[in-house]
Amino acid sequence: MSLAMATSMLASAAMAEEAETEVESEVETEYNGEFAGEDPQLEKKIKILTIWAEDNDNGILLNKICEDYKNNVNPNFDWEYEMVAADNLQQKIATLAASDDLPDFFAYEAGTPLTVLIEADKVVNISEELERIGITDYVNAGAIELMKGLSGTEDVYDLPLGLNVEGFWYNKELFEQAGCEAPETWEEFEEVLAKLYEADIQPLTTGGSDKWPATRLVNAYAVRTAGNDVMTKAANGEIDYTDEALVAAADKIAEWAEKGYFGEGITTVDANTAGSMLMSGKAAIFYNGSWFTQNLTDETQNLAGEDGIGFFNIPVVDEEISSATSYSMNCGNILCLDKGKYDDATAWFLKYYCENMGDLAMTELGSVKGYTYTVEAEDMDDYTKLVLEEIDKSTEGFAWWEAKMSSEVSKTAQENVQALLNGEMTGEEYMQSIQDAHDMSEF
Amino acid sequence: MKKKKIKAILQGIVIALICAVDVYPLLWMVSASFKQQSEWTSKPAYALNEGFHFQNYIDAWTRGHMATFFMNSLLCTLIALVFIVLFACTVGFATTKMQWKGREFVSKFFSLGIMVPVATALIPLFQIFNQLNLLNTRFCLIITYIAFGLSLSIYLVQGYLRSLPDELLEASVIDGCGIYRMMWLVVTPLMKNAIVTVLVLQFFFKWNDLLFSMTFISDSALKTVQTGLLYFQDEFGSKNWGAIFASVSMSVLPMLVLYTILNKKVMEGMTAGAVKG
Amino acid sequence: MKKVLGNKKAVALFVLPALIIYAIFVMLPVLWSFYYSLYSGSPGLKWEFVGLKNYSRLLVDKNFIKALTVNLKYISVVTIGQVSLGLALALMFKFWLRRCKSFVRTLIFFPVVLPTVAVGQLFNKIYEIQPNYGLLNSFLEGIGLEQLVQPWLGQSSTALWCLCIMDIWVAMGFYSVIFYGALLNIPDDIIEAARIDGSGSWNMFRRILLPLLRPMVVTCFVFSFSGTVKMFESALALTKGGPAGSTKSLSMYMYDVSFTYGKVGYGSVIAIVIFLICIVGSFLINRFDTKD
């Protein structure tokens, strides 16, 4: 009885799938809007799916910009805002994509996850659309380049929700106590660490339980010794993950952990805690991105005060290989548009969004999101200025450790970095495990 | 005689220790939920709270959406329980006391399910609900809870019914009872202990479910206590211990109150030997 | 009598609704898993028939083997811990406890009713080391055992044990109450007779109580086994499978593979393995029951 049922249900599922593909091929979106004049106030309700609560970070911005658009431009516009936990985002999007039910706008991850959607033809080609609507100038050119690089495509298929540089944040008071200055070369950096350690200060902290902040450290040394594109090469198979340079980078982090630079139980510390340890003077250096300014500008969190925390880019090993002006950069979690639901009404909203996001982000959060803004720099706080200066200095960018890895490889790289920090794996074993995962993912 | 007394005292100490191991973490948790942030750094973790910092609870309640989570958990669990008990009784009765062809087969078929781990069915269930557009509804949780509660419950009820003498049923037939009246008025009251056992067991299973709820539900308005708590740390950051403890205490207290009220019934049901091998 | 109990309509009404729900939501998905296990990708995205390739992948997948080892270790430690401690507690209630019996039983049962995730959060704080010492570490420091202070959940060598202890703590009260019920069913005169014969406590336990309790021991093992085989909730709440996968169970790995990596077919193979472990395990446990 159950067998009969099983077969009939399977059959119907298969039929449903067939029907879906038919519909898909019929839908050919026709664009014929003129986007120069007044907003035609088309009726539209869009769905937004993100990983931020409505009163947090980009959640504030997205809701505010929808509200502004509805109040100031198009009263027939409406929106629905849904939030999922960051951990669930990939699963949720994958499911929705498989059933052709992606929301109009959704937050996603750049790199391999997005590439999968691009290949499946699920997301709007943003480059084309910006061109057609005539708003290319409103999106930061540097951000566009970054995103192209990450997805490895000629056009971009996503909108930035940040323009971040990453590097080392340090507690100035602790540096003074130990008689150190912000290092420029890797040798100086190692000296600083040793000096801090001798002065009985915990030199480094990282978000070992969140894992990504720790792999960033491996990435830092790998890039500086083997070039900005070393991880891309490894992903393409030009070099192995067990390449000497990469093993050396992993060993470097293991060596630091072994020496006790990270303090006790680093694999149980999350990024938030690590940040507050830096700000409260319990640790001297913390690698993080420019989004950290959000915490730094919050007086209740930042016990070090307005000028207490400084920033230096990843110190250089060899200028020829990776220059002092190349930074680890990213666009944060990115925003994609579902291709199936995209129409003129959405395009008009997109126009408003791109034109206004830069200023809104600056006034609401004091942060740079990758759009042009007109707000005066004087209104900014010092930390935001500091970040902008660093961004200005950058001539080249490189991506993070897992950017080019598939989710499987990336999971392994992240999980095992804890073993590296604990001394349970050597650099070679760590890189071998990544190589194994890479081989398996193509199995 | 003296030796006996010492022995009794020693035994008492061992039991007191076991109770302490069991209860102390809970007391610590409640005490910790009233601590201010600064107390964590200035004093060792085992110290008692200085004052009653109710802000922790306010934070947990407002930002943590505890009320919603509770509502969802209760709704899903209770509805599922009603059906599980109903089905367990009817199927249990039909497969042990009623006479029809294929009852052995049906009974075996149900007992197969005891072996099925929830993880095995997870992926196809997810796909089915996805196809039917039922993800993110309470319905899909409730129906899976029911389905996965059946096998064990039926098995327990059957064990109990087998030991029920047939004469009772015969007597009721002679009294002129139809099948439905017999089921409702004669058999059900006799199964009280079995029903309590099923209720208690299934309540804990369902209340503790995380795998299904985190897979099927992503909408925060529909999350259960378990899934809600899981992402609590993300919302507050792990350094806000006070709020985390407050939310955990809040999720624990109603259970303890409920349990203390039902305590006698639960113990009766469990110790009456209804859980038979 | 026959007429009443042979009422076909009543049988249908009693059995069919449950049977349909059960068939669709429990048995059908199990069969469906076998079908899925022959495909790669996930339905709707890169869904291709690959035959038995997913099964051969299992043999060379180090992560799978690791998760399997973790899972088996966990099952053996936790089932034995839960059942034996539960039995020990029940014996204490019966023979040692003279006053406040029901009060103590109520206390011991407390942890059973707590939501797993709440317990996980609680123990997370108990084991914590950074930024402040948690209960355990601050206690060790307080009594002068600083050298024992360590990141309990941060290292592979201790994380799994910490998890096992938590799960035993939670469930031992449950088993003790079941055993206590069984002990009450043993007539007092049997125990008295043994006492008069002069057998010591251990002898009495081995010769008289254990054989009488055997069916209950088997039942408890089945309960505990089916609870531990799925190993998901508590591990996720306490350690999220870390550090470095040292507390990652098969269910968690299956979850990652099918929902994060998007390999539903391979995930189904792992699901089938969990199913097989369940069947083999229950079979082994039940052999103890039917031996004589």
Image (cartoon, coloured by chain):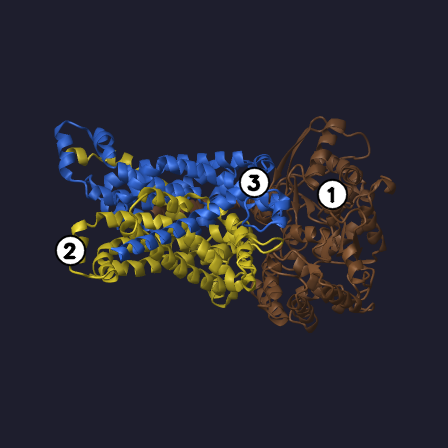
Chain colours: A brown, B blue, C yellow
Q: Is residue A123 left or right of residue A424?
A: right
What residue is pinned by disc 2? C193
Visible in this render: residue A396? yes
- The reply to the same-chain question for discs 1 and 2 is no
What residue is pinned by disc 1? A298
What residue is pinned by disc 3? B34
Q: Is residue A314 left or right of residue A114?
A: right
Q: Give the chain of mark 2.
A: C
Tell me the quarter of the picture where residue A338 sits. Answer: top right
Whole-Å distance between the Cαs marked 2 and 3? 55 Å
Q: Nearer the viewer, residue A203 or C5?
A: A203
Residue A416, x across and y down, in percent: 59, 63
Whole-Å distance between the Cαs marked 1 and 3? 25 Å
Whole-Å distance between the Cαs marked 1 and 2? 76 Å
Residue B246, x across and y down, in percent: 55, 40
Q: Dot 2, how many residues are within 10 Å of its Cα: few (below 14), some (14-19), or many (20+)?
A: few
Above or below, A296 relative to A353: below
Residue at 82% from the left image edge and 64% from the top image edge: A184
Q: Amino acid under label 3?
A: Phe
